[in-house]
């Protein structure tokens, strides 16, 4: 009963944080990141552990919670992956995306090997964390500041290319640990082919099956990324549009009210708050907070210098800040790495702090104001322009 009370309290706190943040012009994910990184750890340390006698392992142990987490994970990962389904690659967006991915990725690999003494898939994963950009949050910022549509579309296309590269490389990296584990996800990814041959044409049915199979992949620790990318690739080849089963406004509400808070809390409560950052010395912690942001900004700047200006008077500094946004994509990415034990809870928490700073930077630069009626979060933001 106490565990249920904790999770109800956590969801209530996130709802309050979003409401308060909205009054100050903050989009929900910024308020949620602030709560998760600055309030949840003290709450665990000062109240939940000493008074309720509950640690992180106990809080994530119930089977009902694991099922709810799996549903939230499938919803968010499905949303992120479907962003790239109808991508039409623009040459200028590709010029922007290549340095924006390559520079922080190389920096992350170097940081993993030379500073953290990590190798293999963990080093690969850290490089991808350095490189990733949050597509949904970027979209909200662009809408909030009334960014020119053509320029905004190019930034979103670049972000989608970067994220697809990150998810695909992580999936391949995970599969390299156990090549035989790829067989079942790949077979599941091919399901649209026989279903289409049998006459199934309902786009929402394919979308529902996609979420159900993503849930199963996460629950049974299969390679959800390879399945998701392969499944959507089959639908694209068959020219079947992807339509998630829920209406857009319900999808948005579920994400903001349940999925994002649950995934954030699920990760943070597993951090040992007594020794959260003791796994790193001061230089290592500084590197994890600064290098991802600096290398990403440098990559963005190089890409923007290579590509032609998106419009007369376009600010490279502003666009570099926007492409440095982390937010939702990085939250799901980090939780996946933590669940696969590719990163430690201490590294998870340090990267969460970095994600918070990177996502707040456009807000601190005055790019955070949103209309009184918050803009909706589309399934494919690039298609809205």
Image (tube, helix red, strand yellow):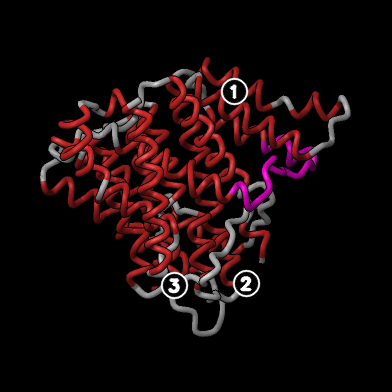
Q: Nearer the viewer, residue 348 or 208?
A: 208
Q: Position of residue 314 (x, y in %)?
A: 49, 79
Instruction: Please indicate, yes or no, whether residue 302 appears anywhere in the rendered image.
Output: no
Query: Label 3 neighbourhood size at 10 Å, few (<14), some (14-19), many (20+)?
Result: some
Give the CA separation, mark 2 to mark 1.
37 Å
Classify residue 152 as left or right of residue 11: right
Classify residue 131 as left or right of residue 175: left
- Residue 238 quadrant: top right
Residue in view at x 76 percent, y 44 percent: 241
Front tag of 3 and 2: 3
Helix, strand, or loop for circle 2? helix
Magenta-colored span: 232-251
Q: Are marks 3 and 2 in contact (CB under 8 Å)?
A: no
Instruction: Please indicate, yes or no, whether residue 268 appears anywhere in the rendered image.
Output: yes
Residue under numbered circle 1: 185
Residue under numbered circle 2: 150
Q: Nearer the viewer, residue 156 or 24?
A: 24
Q: Quadrant of the N terminus?
A: top left
Give the CA separation, mark 3 to mark 2.
21 Å
Q: Position of residue 291 (x, y in %)?
A: 26, 54
Residue in view at x 86 percent, y 27 percent: 197
Query: Label 1 neighbourhood size at 10 Å, few (<14), some (14-19), many (20+)?
Result: many
Helix, strand, or loop for circle 3? loop
Residue under numbered circle 3: 369
Residue in view at x 49 percent, y 68 percent: 306
Q: Is residue 128 magenta?
A: no
Helix, strand, or loop for circle 1? helix
Q: Position of residue 244 (x, y in %)?
A: 68, 42
Query: Label 2 neighbourhood size at 10 Å, few (<14), some (14-19), many (20+)?
Result: few
């Amino acid at each position: 009963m106490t565990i249920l009370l904790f999770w109800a309290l956590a969801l209530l706190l996130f709802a309050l944080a979003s409401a308060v943040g909205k009054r100050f012009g903050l989009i929900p994910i910024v308020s949620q990141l602030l709560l998760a990184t600055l309030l949840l750890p003290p709450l665990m340390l000062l109240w939940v552990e000493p008074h309720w006698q509950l640690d992180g392992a106990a809080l994530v142990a119930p089977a009902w919670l694991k099922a709810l987490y799996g549903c939230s994970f499938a919803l968010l990962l499905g949303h992120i992956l479907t962003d790239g389904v109808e991508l039409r690659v623009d040459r200028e967006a590709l010029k922007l995306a290549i340095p924006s991915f390559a520079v922080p990725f190389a920096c992350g690999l170097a940081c993993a090997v030379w500073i953290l003494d990590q190798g293999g898939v963990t080093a690969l994963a850290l490089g991808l964390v350095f490189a990733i950009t949050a597509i949904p949050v970027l979209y909200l910022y662009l809408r909030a500041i009334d960014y020119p549509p053509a320029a905004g579309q190019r930034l979103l296309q670049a972000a989608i290319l970067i994220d697809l590269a990150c998810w695909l490389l992580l999936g391949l990296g995970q599969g390299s640990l156990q090549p035989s584990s790829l067989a079942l996800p790949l077979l599941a990814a091919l399901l649209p082919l026989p279903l289409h041959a049998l006459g199934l044409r309902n786009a929402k049915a394919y979308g529902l099956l996609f979420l159900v199979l993503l849930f199963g992949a996460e629950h049974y620790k299969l390679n959800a990324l390879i399945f998701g990318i392969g499944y959507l690739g089959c639908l694209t080849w068959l020219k079947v549009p992807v339509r998630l089963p829920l209406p857009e406004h319900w999808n948005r509400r579920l994400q903001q009210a349940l999925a994002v808070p649950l995934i954030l809390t699920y990760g943070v409560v597993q951090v040992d708050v007594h020794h959260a950052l003791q796994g790193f010395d001061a230089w290592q912690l500084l590197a994890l907070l600064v290098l991802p942001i600096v290398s990403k900004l440098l990559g963005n700047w190089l890409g923007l210098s290579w590509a032609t200006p998106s419009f007369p008077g376009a600010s490279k500094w502003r666009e570099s800040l926007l492409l440095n946004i982390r937010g939702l994509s990085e939250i799901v990415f980090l939780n996946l790495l933590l669940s696969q034990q590719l990163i430690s809870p201490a590294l998870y928490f340090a990267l969460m702090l970095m994600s918070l700073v990177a996502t707040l930077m456009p807000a601190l630069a005055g790019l955070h104001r949103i209309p009184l009626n918050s803009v909706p979060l589309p399934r494919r933001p690039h298609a809205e322009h």
